[in-house]
Amino acid sequence: MQIEVPVTNGYLPDIYGKYAPEKYRIDDGPVRSFPIKIMAAPADTKTFAVVMIDHDAIPVSGFTWIHWVAANLPGDLITIPENASQSGEIPMTFGNNSSAGGLVHNQNPLTSQHYNGPMPPNKDHRYTVIVYALDSKLPLKDGFWLNDLHDTMKDHVLAEASQVVLGRA
């Protein structure tokens, strides 16, 4: 399985991150998720899960920052469309991103349980996007955490693919 996230010279386009226009922001943060092409997923894929994390956030926050975690996307997708996290076009179960945690205490589910775009504060950051092909729907509810995803998808991962993209400071 492979995935393809759009990049320009290795960078995520500005509309998905720190320099997104106002119409693509909520509470001053970028919320328009990028499209993800999915190629050669196993034929018996029932659902997908998506994760976007930022290990370059460790010196800033003390931990890897979770920008997006979602599960139970339909297994017949060949593209997760642009803005799928906010549009409702594709059904999914929304996990908490790091803004929902104890450091930020974000209580707005539109921004704490959906895609939260890159806003690197100190330098360009590398973001890892991972798509998992799974053999079943996972027993998760909106507001789950990344560790819940890892626990529930154990023994259900048929394939995974990742891509690292840059977000500009």
Image (cartoon, helix red, strand yellow):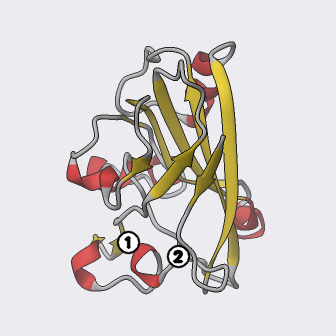
Q: Please tell me whether residue 94 is drawn above or below residue 163 in the rendered image.
A: above
Identify the element where label 2 is drawn. Answer: loop
Q: Is residue 127 left or right of residue 104?
A: right
Quarter of the picture holding the C terminus: bottom right
Mark 1 element type: strand
Residue in front for this viewpoint, 44 or 70: 44
- Quarter holding the N terminus is top right
Q: Is residue 76 above or below residue 157?
A: below
- Residue 15 screen position, x and y as percent: 39, 79
Which amino acid is tagged 1?
Answer: Pro
- Amino acid residing under circle 2: Met
Q: Is residue 52 above or below residue 73?
A: below
Q: Residue at x 58, y 34 (%)?
A: 41
Residue 4 falls left or right of residue 137: right
Q: Nearer the viewer, residue 5 or 152?
A: 5
Which residue: 58% across, 59% down? 4
Q: Which residue is mark 2?
A: 119
Q: Are marks 2 and 1 in contact (CB under 8 Å)?
A: yes
Using the image, determine if residue 139 lies above or below residue 159: above
Q: Give the spatial CA distance, label 2 vs label 1.
A: 8 Å
Which residue is drawn at the image coordinates 46% and 26% (left, top)?
A: 47
Q: Kindly identify which residue carries mark 1.
A: 30
Residue 16: x percent and y percent? 43, 73
Q: Earlier in the sequence, mark 2 or mark 1?
A: 1
